Structures are given as C-alpha cells and as structure tokens.
C-alpha cells in the first residue's frame, strides 16, 4: 500500500540571516528516498537557472509533477500569444491624449489584402459558403483588414482635428491657427496620413507646416459649385447634363469638371465644352476643368485610381466649400441650386440619397459597414434594414452633397478608403457596387454627422406594365385604366423634403443603359410624365413593408426595373418639370442619333 502513497520530503532550511536565500524542495519519484536540497539565490534567477530548474523538475518529478509543469508551460505560452496579439492590435507603450481620448503613437503593422487572390467576378451571396478554403481565408483576411483600417481612420481623424482646422479658415487666419496647433501632434498626424495616403504629393518633412492641407484649395465658406467626374467616353452624357444646367434651368452656378489627364478628357473635348457651356460672363470662370492627376499621385503602385473612384477626390480638389457631386448620367428635374436649399443638408452639412430596395443577391454592404464601424448610429441602423431583411444597396451615389467647411473629416475619410488599392478592390468585388456605400460609411466610421433624404426612391416614366406581356405607353386617354396591380417602369426618382420630384439617375432612355430589350419603347427617350414615390422614411417602411413601398420587379421585355405604386398611387408630374425634363431628354436623344 505504501508503494502507492506519494510523500514529499521537506528538508530543513539552512540558517539565514539576511533573508536573501530560499530553499526549494525537490520532488522524488522514490517515496522513501530524500534528496539534498539545492539553494538558489534570487539574484541567480537567470534564464539558464530557470531552464536548469525546469529540467531538474522534469527528470526527478513523478507524473503528477510533470503534468503540473506542462500545464504551467501551456499557460505561459498562451499568455505570451495573447500579450503579443493585444500589443500588436493596441500598442499602449506610447500614447498621447487628445480631446479626452488616448491615441496610439506607435504605428502597428498594417494588414494587407493579397490582391493576387481577388477575382473580379462577384460571388453570389447564397453560394459563398461553398467557396474554397483559400477564398474564405481571403474574406476573413479582408474583414480583419477593414476592422483595423476603421480603427486607424478614427485615430487619424482624432489626431488631426486641430491640423484639419486649417482647411476651414481663410488664408489670413492660417498662420494664427498653425501657431495654435501642437507641433508634436501635427508631426505625428502628418507621418500617419503620409503612410495611409500615398496619393498625396509633397513631403511633410521638408514641406510647408500645413501639409497636407496645402495640397488642396482652402474652401470659401460661402461658395457653391457642381462637381462632375467625366471623360471622353461619357461626352454625350456630359453635354446633356451641361445643357440641362445652363440651357434648360438657366443656372449660372459654377461647374467643375474633374478628370484624369488628357487621355481621359482630351483638350479638344474641353475646348468644345468651354465654347458651348461657359456662362455669358466668364470672368468668374464658371466652367473650370481640373486635372486630378496633377494634384494627386493617382498612379502610385498602392493607389491606381480611375473611373468612378475619382469622384470624392474631385470634391476635395475644388475650391468651393459647398459642393454637389453629380453623376454624369443624372437628369436634373429642377435647378441645381435647390439641392443646396434642402433643410437636411443645411442642418447637417452632408446629404445622401437612398438607393432602392431591390435584391440581386450579389452585394453585402453590411459586411463593409459593420467592419469599419461596429457602433452604428440610429440613421445607419435604419438604413441597413429593409423590413426584416438587410438592404443590398443603401446609398445612391448619383448625387452627393457635402459642406467641406463643416464635414471635411468625412470627405477625407472617403478619399482614404477609395485611395487604398487593396481595400477598394476587395470591397468592390462583391461587397459594394462602385462607390455607392463609401460616402455614408466613411461618415459613420469616424462619427461624422450626416443625413439621408426623407423619401425613399421612386420611379418616373410613362410605361405601365402588368407583367403579363402588356406594356403600355401611357397617354391622357388611359387615366381610367390604371390599376393597383400595374407597375410604373422608368428611371429611379429622388425627391425633395416635400416629396416632389427632384432628380433621377440612370440616363435618358426608358430602359437601363446596360440592358437589351426587345420592345421598341425600351429604346425610346424617357417620357417623364408619371411618378410614384417609395415612401416617407419618417412614417413608413422602406421596401416591401406593410405600406407596400418599393416593390420592384425587373421587366425583361423593356430592360428596366418597374415599381408597383403604394397607397398614393401613380401621379402626374407637374407640367413645368415635364417640360424641362423633356427638353433634356430630347437633347440627349438627338445628340446620340448624330453620333455625339
């Protein structure tokens, strides 16, 4: 029986007078044998001493001692891994305090998304669980990179709050503001933004103290402008939009056309547009062309910007403070000045319009939004959900209004997102379409105030469909034939605060520009005589809720999305709006038949 009893021998400690010695007992595998204790001084606890002690415990200990030793080694290894991970994500050894928050100073390693593994073809949401292990690993890596990137953007904007104030002051006050900015924070901010924005030119080390704010014009608080990003490939659309602003609405608002080099918008095209669409008195330079490739390094190996991704950079590059960014295929139903008069824009300094609630099962913007900012505002939480399902499209980027004198942080954040090549490619593959969700996500990421338009999008046009092969071009004699089960087909329509048609997007034809259709009416010019709204966001549900708002269905015969009307039914458009919109449509159709 005694062979199975485990006994320890506790040796008598040696005499000590200074308290610097400790006697450590050693376990013996033989219950009847005692070992001579080894005395170790505290000052001898080097790495070699620890290793010798562990080796001794392993050689002379029984299975229980070895189990305990292995357990402690595992705990030690786990603690080392956790401490390493925490230190990598949130360095705490060097921070500064700004605006009541602790801002990490030591830069962390940036997670990069391996772009060589990214396919340009989107993967349908329903089949993503069937993707290969490497594809799923790529998604996990990308999402982790987005989480880290969101944290970095918040830290950057918090750190640069003082430095950014230079963009909202006049040139006479720049020196005063610069002197009030803490030089250490400014230098740190410049180092961080230089690493995160390789598209910025200049060097903060040898350049002006107000870099990078000196790379863009200082906005005048009272100035307004229309910003259009376009090239030679969009000339017919561009001419139609300029014709609508200058000829149809008789507006003399400054127009800034931004582009990427002569290969994008040729000198001949610029000369032609300047000739026909400059204001009568061009002393104010109301039509100006801005080459973004001069201001920014768009072809940097980690940037490679072009196309619709240039749009927020265009807003950043113009000297005006209040800017409205228009897609080149927008149909302005009313003068552009009315966009700046919207109460929600004046109150919040940024106004975004909602996209229609239509599922293609291709895009997951919630993945982008929640990774960049897990703590959503009430506005974002509402915009993300459509009834009991998640919206596949949230923001329509055809019109974006930003007051740079108040909301420069949000605009810079949008540029930083689209200016990072791997993030842009990753999210635009099958998470978001183009730049649609970038603007409000940028504002959400850094807690910048903004507002969505009051009304959900509707539809404007003249074709009525029952989806049983009967697609009718509406006329006044058919007023009594309209039934609730009939849908209105045409362009997506957006509204002002009062629910009146304000602008539409997607072109000037009945069908979608990138669709083919067998019926002749699809290729004809849009007749903007009827409209239906998509619901009031303050009182009604967006999408197919109890009020029946935004029930969209694609009509393959016409090549366009159609919307079934809500309780307010299909209504006629005001004559003045019909007249102005028809003028713009006729100009585009005539110009397209002539070959531009």
Image: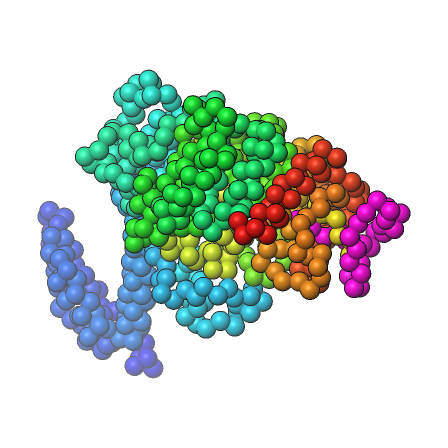
Q: Nearer the viewer, residue 490 or 212?
A: 490
Above or below, 446 against 322 in this view is below
The N terminus, quarter of image:
bottom left
Is residue 169 rendered to the left or right of residue 332?
Answer: left
Is residue 368 rendered to the left or right of residue 380?
Answer: left
Indicate how the structure is coloured in the image: rainbow
Q: What residue occupies the far right of the structure in this picture? A: 480
Q: Nearer the viewer, residue 361 or 583?
A: 583
Q: Which residues are magenta?
A: 466-491
Looking at the image, which residue is at 81% across and 47% down?
Answer: 475
Would residue 501 be seen by someone viewing this image from the given angle?
A: yes
Looking at the image, which residue is at 75% across and 35% down?
Answer: 574
Q: Nearer the viewer, residue 564 or 560?
A: 560
Question: Where residue 505 sits: x, y (%)?
Answer: 60, 46
Question: Where residue 56 sits: x, y (%)?
Answer: 17, 70
Question: Where residue 250 sits: x, y (%)?
Answer: 59, 29
**Residue 377 lies within the magenta run:** no
Question: Where residue 385 sits: x, y (%)?
Answer: 63, 50
Is residue 62 rendered to the left or right of residue 431?
Answer: left
Would residue 437 be seen by someone viewing this image from the given angle?
A: no
Above or below, 14 against 435 in this view is below
- The tally of labels here is 0
**Residue 476 lies within the magenta run:** yes
Q: Nearer the viewer, residue 585 or 194?
A: 585
Looking at the image, which residue is at 80% across and 45% down?
Answer: 569
Above or below, 188 against 66 in this view is above
Looking at the image, which residue is at 64% across and 44% down?
Answer: 585
Quarter of the image where one finds residue 52? bottom left
Is residue 259 rendered to the left or right of residue 337?
Answer: left
Q: What residue occupies the far front of the structure in this picture? A: 594
């Amino acid at each position: 029986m005694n062979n199975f009893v485990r006994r320890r021998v506790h040796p008598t400690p040696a005499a000590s007078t200074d308290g610097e010695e400790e006697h450590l007992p050693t376990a013996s595998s033989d219950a009847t044998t005692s070992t001579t204790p080894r005395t170790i001084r505290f000052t001898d606890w080097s790495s070699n001493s620890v290793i010798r002690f562990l080796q001794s415990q392993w050689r002379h200990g029984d299975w229980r001692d070895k189990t305990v030793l292995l357990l402690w080694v595992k705990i030690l290894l786990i603690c080392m891994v956790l401490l390493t991970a925490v230190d990598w994500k949130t360095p705490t050894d060097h921070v500064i305090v700004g605006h009541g928050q602790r801002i990490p100073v030591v830069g962390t390693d940036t997670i990069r998304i391996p772009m060589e593994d990214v396919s340009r073809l989107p993967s349908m949401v329903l089949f993503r669980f069937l993707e290969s292990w490497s594809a799923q690993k790529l998604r996990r890596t990308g999402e982790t990179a987005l989480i880290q990137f969101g944290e970095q953007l918040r830290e950057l904007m918090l750190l640069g709050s003082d430095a950014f104030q230079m963009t909202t002051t006049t040139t006479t006050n720049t020196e005063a503001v610069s002197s009030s900015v803490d030089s250490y924070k400014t230098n740190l901010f410049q180092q961080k933004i230089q690493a995160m924005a390789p598209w910025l030119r200049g060097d903060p080390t040898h350049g002006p103290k107000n870099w990078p704010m000196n790379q863009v014009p200082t906005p005048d608080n009272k100035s307004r402008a229309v910003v259009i990003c376009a090239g030679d490939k969009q000339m017919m659309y561009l001419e139609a939009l300029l014709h609508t602003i200058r000829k149809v609405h008789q507006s003399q608002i400054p127009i800034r056309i931004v582009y990427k080099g002569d290969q994008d918008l040729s000198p001949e095209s610029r000369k032609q547009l300047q000739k026909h669409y400059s204001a009568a008195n061009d002393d104010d330079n109301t039509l100006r062309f801005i080459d973004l490739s001069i201001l920014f390094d768009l072809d940097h190996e980690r940037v490679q910007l072009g196309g619709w991704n240039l749009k927020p950079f265009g807003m950043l590059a113009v000297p005006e403070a209040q800017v409205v960014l228009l897609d080149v295929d927008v149909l302005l139903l009313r003068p552009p000045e009315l966009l700046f008069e919207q109460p929600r824009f004046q109150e919040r300094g940024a106004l975004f319009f909602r996209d229609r609630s239509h599922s293609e099962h291709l895009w997951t913007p919630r993945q982008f939004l929640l990774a960049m900012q897990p703590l959503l505002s009430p506005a974002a939480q509402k915009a993300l959900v459509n009834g009991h399902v998640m919206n596949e499209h949230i923001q329509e980027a055809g019109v974006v209004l930003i007051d740079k004198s108040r909301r420069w942080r949000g605009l810079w954040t949008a540029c930083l997102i689209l200016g990072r090549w791997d993030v842009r490619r990753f999210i635009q593959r099958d998470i978001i379409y183009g730049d649609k969700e970038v603007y409000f996500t940028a504002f959400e990421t850094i807690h910048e105030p903004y507002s969505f338009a009051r009304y959900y999008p509707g539809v404007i046009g003249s074709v009525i469909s029952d989806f049983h092969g009967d697609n009718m071009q509406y006329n006044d004699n058919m007023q009594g034939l309209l039934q609730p089960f009939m849908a209105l087909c045409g362009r997506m329509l957006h509204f002002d605060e009062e629910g009146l048609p304000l602008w539409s997007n997607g072109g000037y034809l009945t069908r979608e520009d990138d669709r083919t259709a067998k019926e002749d009416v699809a290729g004809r010019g849009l007749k903007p005589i009827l409209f239906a709204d998509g619901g009031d966001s303050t009182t009604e549900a967006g999408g197919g809720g109890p009020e029946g708002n935004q029930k969209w269905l694609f009509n393959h015969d016409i090549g366009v999305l159609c919307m079934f009307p809500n309780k307010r039914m299909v209504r006629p458009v005001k004559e003045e709006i019909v007249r102005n919109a028809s003028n713009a449509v006729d100009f585009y159709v005539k110009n397209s038949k002539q070959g531009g």
